Amino acid sequence: MFEPDRTYARRDTALFLLCVALSLGALFSPESWQTAIANGVRRSALAPLLALQELAEESRTSRFRIDALIAERDSAAAAAQALPLIKAENEQLRLILGLARRLPTPSVPAEVLHQALPTDGRTMLLSAGRRSGVAPFQPVVAPEGLLGLIRTAGSRTSIAMSWAHPEFRASALTEDGSVFGIVAATESSSESEPMLELRGVPYRDTVEAGTRVITSGLGGVYPRGIPIGTVVGIARESEGWERTYLVLPAAHPGRASHVLVLRVPAVWPADSAPSEDSLP
Amino acid sequence: MMPRTSRLRFALVIALLVALHFYVRPRLWSPRIAPDFLMLGLMIFAIRSTPGAAAVAGLVTGFVTDALTPARFGAAMLAHTVVGYGAAWGRAVFFADNLLVNAGFIGVGVWLRDLLVLVASGAGGRELLVQLGIWSPLLALTTALAGVIVLGFFRDWLEIRLEE
């Protein structure tokens, strides 16, 4: 009488253990395998569903953000009024100093396809991929500032690693150009919301609260001048050696809906460019 | 074994939930608290199937979720498998055929899934507490509410006995 139930129970337990083993296998498999599998699934089985979500995101963006977009457009129009004068001055100064023309930074617009997991925000699924010119290592920015960089690019979608990811790093400096450091997500876990840290600031340098931090342009990934955040105080210090400052991020990956992927000109010779595998 | 019509109806409800997840969810409030229809589909599946089948469904749901949010690939697979299996066992052993109990059951499943994903992804400290104390309960609540609507509306199709 109990045999069929026992058989079912055994089969259920065996299936459960098999599923757990497969999950653990996926968890500890090499990252290149994980990337290949995830890209393959997004490109094939999930492609129609992602197209559906992209449609919904575009619709939501156009419906709910119209006021914000109008305000942003007005601000941009006001700022652009002084642009011809500044451009002319810049050209003159460049001529005097013998500098070449500044290289333009083309960009690719993309929607952020948010997911339900609590780890959404550490990585972001973007609606643009290789077909639009997106490639690994390209910076991802929101109107407010830096969000992260492209980690992997599929044909129609790509995965960006945001600044909230524990492996994110960017070379940064204060807006006045006096202090350099490395920006990364907070280590201490004492903040309720993910924050950034400006690390490696020499002990002799002091950064006041309220100072804006921007990308330094060193390292060849992020162009100089992208806003990262604002210093809010000292996170910790190694006596006589260095200070680490807490930085309030300018852009939040959890709230971003529309981003730009900057197609920064490669600074590496073609044969020495880093491969996708060299990403953290 | 379910009759063919019943299986077809169940598949239609699951397909509807998948469509809601990808087409309606992005339009609802903040992505942090909009109902997780994929998780809801898994919980409904777990309520009416064997633990082994629920574990496999959890693995598949987690695989899809991991492909879309690869912060820590495999974390969602593990979490959904454990929650799916546990939900099917729990439903068989503990729970009455009551709509609100089922809603609570769905909410607890969502919260537990979030806990497992965060732990497997290495989150800790205050970030973990805030996520599990504020955002996950809100997500669990909205998902449970969506569950009440779906279970109430499709109770005949899903063949889930609910007290009047």
Image (cartoon, rainbow, N blue to C red):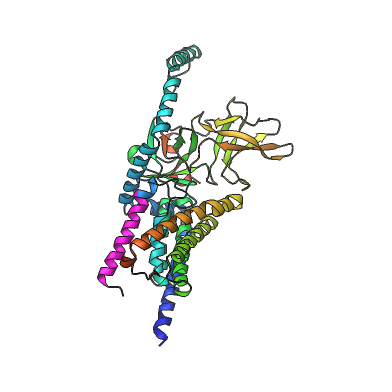
Q: Residue furthest bottom?
A: A1
Tell me if residue B16 is in the magenta stretch. Answer: yes
* Residue B146 at least partly seen: yes
Q: For residue B2, which quarter of the picture?
A: bottom left
Q: Position of residue A160 (x, y in %)?
A: 45, 43
Q: Which quadrant holds the C terminus of chain B?
A: bottom left
Q: Residue furthest front?
A: B164
User: Magenta segment range?
Assistant: B1-23
Q: Is residue A182 left or right of residue B152?
A: right
Look at the picture and state if B14 lies above or below B34. below
Tell me if residue A190 is in the magenta stretch. Answer: no
Look at the picture and state if A127 lies above or below B133. above
Q: Which quadrant holds the N terminus of chain B?
A: bottom left
* Residue B57 at least partly seen: no
Q: Residue at x 61, y 34 (%)?
A: A231
Q: Position of residue A69 (x, y in %)?
A: 40, 31
Look at the picture and state if B6 lies above or below A219. below
Q: Residue furthest left?
A: B5
Q: Position of residue B58 (x, y in %)?
A: 42, 63
Q: Residue at x 31, y 67 (%)?
A: B156
Q: For residue A275, which quarter of the picture?
A: top left
Count of marks overlaid on the render = 0
Look at the picture and state if A221 lies above or below B61. above
Task: In this rendered view, identify the residue nearer to me: A266 or B32.
Answer: B32
Q: Position of residue A197 (x, y in %)?
A: 60, 39
Q: Main secondary structure of the magenta part?
A: helix
